[in-house]
Amino acid sequence: MKIDYQETTNDLLARIDIHKKFGSRDIDEWMLHVLMPQKGSKILDVGCGAGKQCFLFYKALEGEADITGGDVNQELLEKARLENARIGNRIKFIDLDFNQRFPSSDNEFDLTTSCFAIYYSEDIPFTISEMHRVCKPGGRLFTTGPMPENKKLFYDIIREATQKPIPPMPGSSRYSSLIYNSIQSLFSSAEVHIFENPLTFEQVDPFLAYTRASLSEDRRLWKNLFEDAGGFERVMQAIQNVAEQRLLRDGKLVMTKVVGGFLATK
Ligand SMILES: C[S@@+](CC[C@H](N)C(=O)[O-])C[C@H]1O[C@@H](n2cnc3c(N)ncnc32)[C@H](O)[C@@H]1O
């Protein structure tokens, strides 16, 4: 399945910032708790973006790990490389398209990760098989992505504002089914860990900023919804009206992120 999507740097960084400011839990702490990465490990992060997880591992392991991040987005890789220069280029950031064979040998990594990225793969079993191929025997794979109940309030408000069904999202419609099944069928064991993070908005503006960073015109997945419902700005105005009514009624908007962490062993 070809996914007509390209993350933009500003949208990704805006969402990361809003999670930090309005969320009550820290996904980085949760990830480290689930993963317990070990010093001396060789780690590959696939779809690394601006390097969030690579820098997390680097800090947690006090630099004592061989970490590579790969992505197709040059703008995000550039951000990652700038930050990397600040720490003495201790991480490798490489061009890696997860729809192609990875530029890595068989059995190379102790840990292969992909956070909020794997569901943009055009061929999920192929991408998972590449992550499996480059993983050492006994090595681990870890992915994060949205479970079906993720961000219910966000979708409820958009549905009410547009009076249209939400198009199937490549993440939440496939992550806990096709993607988990592909992991289970290749790896010798797999387990699911759930992270729930309620984001609480007491004003409408940060919720709208989050919505824009998720729905902006660059995210072509939503194109049909905008066309049917009268264009992006009209949809945003309708979303604002519904969000304001709900805020008035409930006193706050609570949007819960429900993330699945899939941890598998080769
Ligand atoms: C939501 S971002 C997550 C980035 C990062 N892991 C984080 O959590 O901040 C999704 C990432 O997947 C990357 N991506 C999309 N298609 C890709 C492909 N074919 N190969 C590698 N990365 C891809 C995007 O460029 C983007 O960096």
Image (cartoon, rainbow, N blue to C red):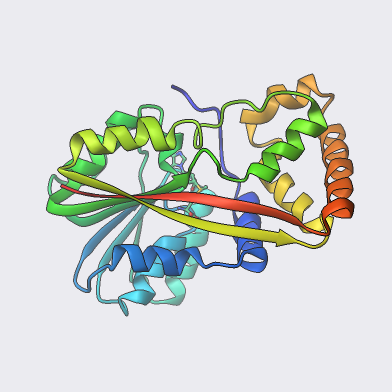
Residue at position x 15%, y 43% from top? Answer: 188
In the current view of this chain or complex, which residue is farthest to the top?
228
Residue 252, picture quadrant = bottom right
In this rendering, is residue 235 above or below 11? Answer: above
x%, y% of residue 121? 41, 33
Is any atom of residue 116 visible in this view?
Answer: yes
Left or right, residue 88 beside residue 157: left
- The reply to whether residue 101 is in sight is no
* Closer-to-camera residue (72/136): 136
**What x and y, as percent, mark residue 29?**
44, 70
Observer-nearest of 39 and 178 = 178
Above or below, 82 against 231 in this view is below
Where is residue 15 shown, x and y percent of the image?
63, 55
Q: Depth check: 262 or 217 in front?
A: 262
- Is 112 left, or right, of 69 in this rendering? left
Q: How many badges with numbers are in the image? A: 0
Spot occupied by residue 263 in the image (x, y as percentages of width and height):
29, 51
